[in-house]
Amino acid sequence: MSKLIALAYSGGLDTSAIIPWLRENMDCEVIAVVGDVGQGSDELAGIETKARNSGARECHIVDLKREFVQDFIEPMLLTGAMYEGRYLLGTAIARPLLAKAQVQVARKVGAKALCHGCTGKGNDQVRFESAFAALAPDLEVISPWRIWNLKGRQDLLDYLKKHNVPTTASATKLYSRDRNLWHISHEGGLIEDPWNAPPDDVWMLTADIKDAPDKSEEVTLTFEHGRARKLNGTQTSPEVLVQKLNEIGGRHGVGRVDLVENRRVGMKSRGLYETPGGTILTEALKGLEEMVLDRETRHWKEHLGLTFAELVYDGRWFTPLREALSVCAEKMAEKLTGDIVVRLHKGHATTIQRRSPNALYSTSFASFDMNDLYDQKHAEGFIRLLSLPERIAALKSGGLK
C-alpha cells in the first residue's frame, strides 16, 4: 500500500502542482487538508473537486473559524501583540491552527508524512514546520519547494499541463495574497519595489480614504474579561463580530498598513495588510486598559506584547513560553470588562467613550478639588524622595563631599 501524505491544500497553483508531483515522485496517495479560517466562499468554492482533479485521494475541509477567533486571535489580542509596531499578525496567527488541523486529519487517516506548499524563502515554512515539530515529531515533513526543480509560475503551469491537471491560473499574477477572517495580505508585483506607492488596485477590504464616507460612524464594543462579546449592544459570536467589524471598518478605510518588515529567515520584505476589524478591536481594548490597568501592569504589558508578537511571527505558538505569556495576559485581562465607543472616520479608529465597573479612573480623584484620600501636601515628600538622586548629583558636582 502506498504511503499517505497529508497536504496543506489551498487550491492555488502551487498546491495543485504538488499533488501530482508527490504522486509521481514519492509513490504515495495524497490527502488534501483545507482549513477554513474565513478566507471566503470564492476561495473555497469547488475546492474539493479541484483537489480530486489534481489527483488527491480525499479532500478534508475543516471549519476552523470559531476556533481561530476564540483560541488564537483573542488570546493574541489580550497581549497587545503587534509585530514591529504595526503588523497585526494576520497570516502568522493562522498558521499554527492550520498546522494543528492538518496533523489531526493526518492522524485520523493514518498518514505517515505532512506536506506544505511554502517557499524556501518565506516565514510560513518556519511556522508550519515548528508546529509539526511540536505536534507530530514522528511524522516526516516534505517541502517540495526546497527539493523539486520547478523554478517558477510558468514551470508549474507546464507541469500541470503535462499531467492533464485543469487550472484557471495564468502565467502572470499581479499579487500574492493570503486571506482569512482576520485580514488580507498582499505581496509581489509592483509592491516589491518600496519606492512604488501602493497600487490602487491592490486593496480589497478597505475603501480609499477619498472614497470613504465624509460622516463618521461610531461602534460600541462590550468586553468581558478582555474579549469583545457585544457589538452595538447585541450579543454576537466572536467570528461574526470580527466579520461585521471588517465590513464597518472597511468602508471607512480603517486598517491599511504598508510595511517593510524583517522576515524570520533574515531578509526584508514589503507587505500591504488590511485588518479593519482587528484595528478597531485593538484600539478599543487599549481604551479599556487605560481605564482599568494600573501603571506598572499597563507598562509591563507593552513588553509582553513585543515578545508575544515575535513568538507568533516566528511560528512559536506551541511553546512553553507562549503558553506562559498567555496565562499572564489572561490574568491581566480579568478586570477588562466594560463598554468602549470607537469613532471611525477617513482611515482612523479612535476611542471616544469609555466605561467599566472596574475602572481605576475617578473624576473626584482626578479633579483639582481637595478630598480625604489625596492630600496635596503629601506630594512634597514624594517628590523629594523621587528626585533624591538628582539632588545628590547636583550637590556633588558643586563640590560637596
Image (cartoon, helix red, strand yellow):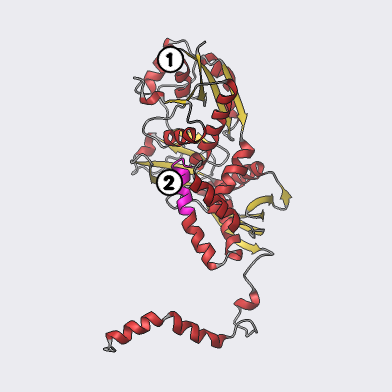
Reply above or below: 319 against 142: below
Reply above or below: 267 against 155: below
Question: Where on the picture, by quarter, is residue 363?
Answer: bottom right
Q: Can you see residue 209?
A: yes
Seen at 59% across and 51% down, the residue is 281
> On the image, numbered disc 2 is attached to which residue?
258
Question: Where on the picture, by quarter, is residue 220?
Answer: bottom right
Relative to the observer, which residue lies in front, 154 or 195? 154
Seen at 53% across and 53% down, the residue is 79
Main secondary structure along the magenta-highlighted residues: helix
Q: Find the magenta span and give its range.
A: 305-316
Seen at 29% across and 85% down, the residue is 396
Relative to the observer, which residue lies in front, 14 or 295? 295
In which quadrant will I find the C terminus? bottom left
Residue 311 in magenta stretch: yes
- The image shows residue 2 at horizontal and vertical percentages of 50, 12
Q: Amino acid at mark 1?
A: Met
Seen at 52% across and 37% down, the residue is 96
Question: Where on the picture, by quarter, is residue 32?
Answer: top right
Report the residue that reaches farthest toward the right: 234
Q: Can you see residue 88?
A: no
Relative to the observer, which residue lies in front, 57 or 17? 57
> On the image, numbered disc 1 is attached to which residue?
26
- The image shows residue 239 at horizontal and vertical percentages of 64, 41
Q: Amino acid at mark 2?
A: Asp
